[in-house]
Image: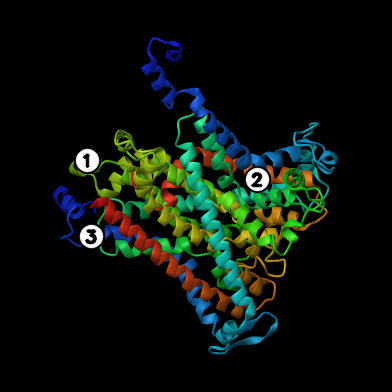
Amino acid sequence: MAVQTAAQRLTSSSTRKQRDYLPYMLVLPIIAYEAIFVLIPIIQQVISSFTSDIIGIGTVRWVGFENYERLFADRNFWNSLRVTLSFMGGTVVLSVGIGLLAALLLNRQFRGRSLARGIMTMPWAMPDLPTVMVFFWILNPNFGVINLFVRWILPIEQTPRWLLDINLALPIVIAIAAWKAFPFYGLVTLSVLQSIPQELYEAAKVDGATPLQSFRYVTLPEIIPTLMLMGVLACIFAFRQFALIFLSTGGGPARTTETLVVSVYKTAFASFDFSYGATIGVAGFVAVFAITLLFAYLQRRQEAQASS
Amino acid sequence: MSTLDTSLPHEQRRSLASPNHWTRRIPVYVLVILFCVVTAFPLYWMIVSVVQPIRLSLQYPPPLFPQAFTLQPFIEIFTGQDTAQRIDVWILNSVIVASVTAVICTLLSILGAFALSGLRWRGQAAFGLMLLTTQMLPEALIVIPLYATIDRLAMKDNLVTLALVDTAFVLPICIWILKNVFDTIPTEIRDAALVDGCTRLRMLWRIMLPIAAPGLVAVGVVAFFHAWNEYLFAASLISDRRLYTASVGLGSMISMIDTPIDRLMAAGLLFSIFPVIFYLLVQRYIVAGLSAGAVKG
């Protein structure tokens, strides 16, 4: 590198005629790193799903598709898929929806805007553990302040047991996850809203558009690509969500909040059935890869639109 | 005020309709206040439960504003007789893990971001997709093989191992963040340096990194607090209580039913303060990097 002439350096960075090894040398350590910590474990996981490996029982042996046959017949697996989809659907709609509303609100001119923006950032910055702790406390069946709020609004004597209630646990976990996630979507949407040229709104006003119409015909077309990308991103974040669910309900009551990732963890570290846990994990890879491709596709389409 | 100027009814109408007139902004303020109260309530409630004596928190209905003031819970979590609950040790462990993660991650991010920004090469798209897939992958899906391998290599209960694993999962986001920062450096500056006879690595070191310094800080902060917040790997790879990170320690406090609520909230508050402050400072960079191209311009 050091003996290259200035002219050679220029051509190697500005054209692709010459073989240029620099980028490969730069990314090699990263690829090696991710291979060790992500790629090899994935391969091990897939191999493991064809074996029987229960900690403390016998030795590891090859069982072919046995684990997969068990998976497809397993009611708990189908249940965890249903829970995952409900959790994903709920958090995506709630967090992106509230994020959009918050962004529209914070996009207006008012005093204390940066303070409001700062407050909105807080739930997102809060780590999972304190989040679970404080919601545990708010939702405590005996002492929780939620009981007070509910009695303000509804004339009920007996408040439910919140996270221990079989019908309420999942909606509550969704609400907690959305509270924590919406600021991110709000901040992203806000930055897009602020990049919309003011002239478009003025032109719409001149044409006699009502505020609702200017939202429909000016704002919405500008933010729809971002909303779609965020929707996919939100799906993935919801799919990954572990600590929040695991710590607040442990998957219960009666597996009503046991998502796929929670069930992988519980199968491996509570039932010590490593290979079956791995099998559920492989089903998860398929889902993640599909969503990632969708994300990459939407992103590329958006970039193509932006440049045309 | 022009609204008092009766001789100009036209002016008056316009000022009432203008978005700057205070009466038109009342609904906005009401909504904003409502929004802030709901958003901030959990954090507020955490603070209230710490600073008022626990007997007040345990009555029904609980007072919505603190009726008395104490800092006893903070003293208790540091001087508690129970040596198993040493939050100072947990926080020190978290700082070690998070610092190692931040250093490795920042160094690797510089390489990756430089390769993605400005350089053109075959396989760039594939590399991007690899990063994206890693970023999307739920940690819980590969915790089993990672645990098994690390157990076999006798590298469990090791804070550096934990930092290495955490780095793998936060690295893609950090690369995107730094790439976005590098992209904002005008190509004229880079080209000028190259014409002056700099090698590209020298140009990266002498020209780009100083300009991108705030971005480097943002990357370090993101990596640091990723490791700081991380629970899954910490919980499965660390079983020695003396090596508990704060997240695992807090998790163990949750599962212990007899932990007094004020101490629990004090620990949680202490654990949240640093990320909340730092995220407020660097949120712009994170938003752009996390959405990885969702925002252009």
The circle on residue A70 is none
Question: Residue B106: in sight, yes or no?
Answer: yes
Q: In front here: B20 or B53?
A: B20
Residue flagged by tag 1: what amino acid is it? Answer: Glu
Q: Residues within 10 Å of mark 2 (few under 14, many from 20)?
A: many
Question: Residue B153: in sight, yes or no?
Answer: no
Say what secondary structure mark 3 lies in: loop
Name the chain letter of the residue that bears numbered label 2: B
Assess whether mark 2 and mark 3 are in contact (beta carbons under 8 angstroms). no
The circle on residue B188 is 1
Residue flagged by tag 2: what amino acid is it? Answer: Phe
**Residues beneath discs 2 and 1 located on the same chain:** yes
Instruction: Determine whether, in the image, residue B156 is placed left or right of residue A111.
Output: right
Say what secondary structure mark 2 lies in: helix
Instruction: State which quarter of the image contains the N terminus of chain B.
Output: top left
Say what secondary structure mark 1 lies in: helix
Q: Nearer the viewer, mark 1 or mark 3?
A: 1
For marks 3 and 2, give the CA distance.
47 Å
Name the chain letter of the residue that bears numbered label 3: A
Query: Where B291 falls versus A201 (above or below)?
Result: below
The circle on residue A20 is 3
In terms of image quadrants, where is residue B233?
Answer: bottom right
**Residues beneath discs 1 and 3 located on the same chain:** no
Q: Nearer the viewer, mark 3 or mark 2?
A: 2
Q: Which residue is mark 2?
A: B271
Query: Where B293 falls versus A236 (above or below)?
Result: above
Instruction: Determine whether, in the image, residue A266 is placed left or right of residue A210.
Output: right
